[in-house]
Image: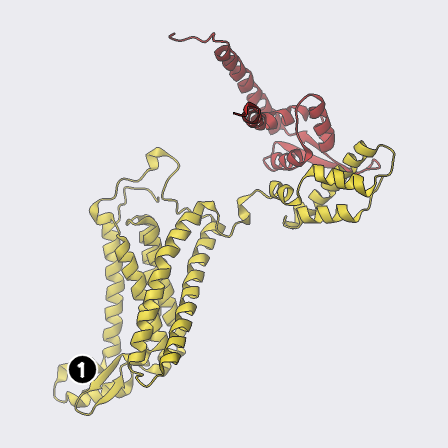
Amino acid sequence: MDHNEIVTGLMLELRRGTLVMLVLSQLEQPMYGYNLVKNLNENHIAIEANTLYPLMRRLESQGLLVSEWETSANKPRKYYVLTPDGKIVLEKIKTHWYESINHINLILEGEYDGEK
Amino acid sequence: MMVKNDLIERYIYAVTKDLSRQTREDVSKELHSLIIDMLEERCGELKPTEHDIHVVLTELGQPKELAEKYNHDEDKYLIGPTYYGQYKMTLKIVLPCVILGMVVSSLIGYINEPDIQWYSLVAELVGSTVGGTFFAFSIVTLLFAIFQYKKIDIDVYPNSLDDLPAVPKEKERISKKEVIFGIGFSVLFMTLFLMAPQIFSVVLTQEGRVIPIFNIEFIRSTWYIVIIFGILGIVREIFRLIHLRYNIQVMVVTIITNVISAFFAIFWLRNDHVINPVMITELSNLFVGEAFIVNLLSNIQNVFLCLILFALVLDIIITVLNTNFSGNMK
């Protein structure tokens, strides 16, 4: 049995579920895509540009992000930042995340309430 | 640093070519700036080589995969996953009906052409059957493409449990046999009138003469009306096939198709051209003295019209009576 393969698959699913939340959390300040990729990678979140770029467009079409081209510098770059709606969604999903993490940790540590 | 490179241009073009025009330009610019950033990350101040570009683009992934990530919305489908199952099921029923109907009507059509050579019979049979099948395929595809484009809700399975329709009572059910019969009838009607209207004939036995009932030239010149009748009939049956029960959507479609059919029937039969005048005079001569029959013959177009309208109205009445109004649109 190849444990690593199964673990890799599970990790991928866990990461996929948290990706939008992580991206939103980094965009309180305007940032361009590649900068965000590097930031996340440096903080041990493996994400590739070919996932992040289409994702940011989708979040923009959902109204959670807004973008603007910065052309004054020598290289034109597209900066994304949270919209007010995006901020609300981020706060809500963070609250859910912390709650879930608490419950999950309790269950994993075997300290949950309930009939033994 | 502005890098102009053929491979980069080709890569970006391949990713963006299927996107809509507004997004295409924006995504191209964005990808270009991303690739420049990645090259700079890799090469620093050095000028990137072709090899560097290769590595960076490989890291970015297959153009096809990236294009799919950018183009994930449902609008790209002619018939999307929501409708595909129903579409396939409808084709599975409609196409055999049409093929059978075409073969039968072709054979009937050749009954009064006994001189025909077997090879031209086979050729015409195959030709008209293939043509008719493609026609039916186009009609079904067009109908479902309209469902997709207009996002028409034909889903038999609703989102909420409470919206699940009641199990249809016996009288609300539509059997597949009825649908197959209905489609078969439409196909027979259409093909016989289009290909061989002369087979509807009166045979004068003592003289051995065959007089067509219909005015062949007029029928030929109004081929589009025949096709409209056929299409309306098939569309109505497809809605019945999708739901297999009398519900409000089936009722609305039945009323619309039958009312349109009625208008065309009136347009077709109110101008004294459909029936062959020779047939009326010949038959009237046979029945001299029988006032009722002669009267009937001279009004035969109106009799036909009344019969057609009666059938259309009856179909509406039966549908309305069987419809379950307490359920929802689903």
Work out whether B131 lies above or below B296: above
User: Counting other residues with Cα less than 10 Å from the Cα at mark 1, is it few (<14), some (14-19), or many (20 or more)?
Assistant: few
Q: Residue at x 12, y 88 (%)?
A: B289
Q: Name the residue furthest right.
A: B46
Q: Nearer the viewer, residue B120 or A96?
A: B120
Pinpoint the chain carrying mark 1. Answer: B
Q: Residue at x 41, y 63 (%)?
A: B136
Q: Residue at x 25, y 73 (%)?
A: B304
Q: Nearer the viewer, residue A34 or B229?
A: A34
* Residue position marked by numbered label 1 in the rendering: B295
Q: Nearer the viewer, residue A93 or A39?
A: A39
Q: Is residue B293 left or right of residue A24?
A: left
Work out whether B7 lies above or below B125: above
Rendered location of residue B64, percent (x, y): 63, 45
Residue B267 lies in quadrant:
bottom left
Q: Is residue B210 left or right of residue B238?
A: left
Q: Residue at x 67, y 47 (%)?
A: B16
Residue B256 visible here: no
Residue B95 visible here: yes
Residue A76 lies in quadrant:
top right
- Is label 1 in a helix, a strand or a loop? helix
Chain coloured red in the rendered structure: A
Chain coloured yellow in the rendered structure: B
Q: Which amino acid type is marked by label 1?
A: Asn
Work out whether B283 lies above or below A12: below
Q: Name the residue furthest bottom.
A: B207
Rendered location of residue A96, percent (x, y): 53, 19
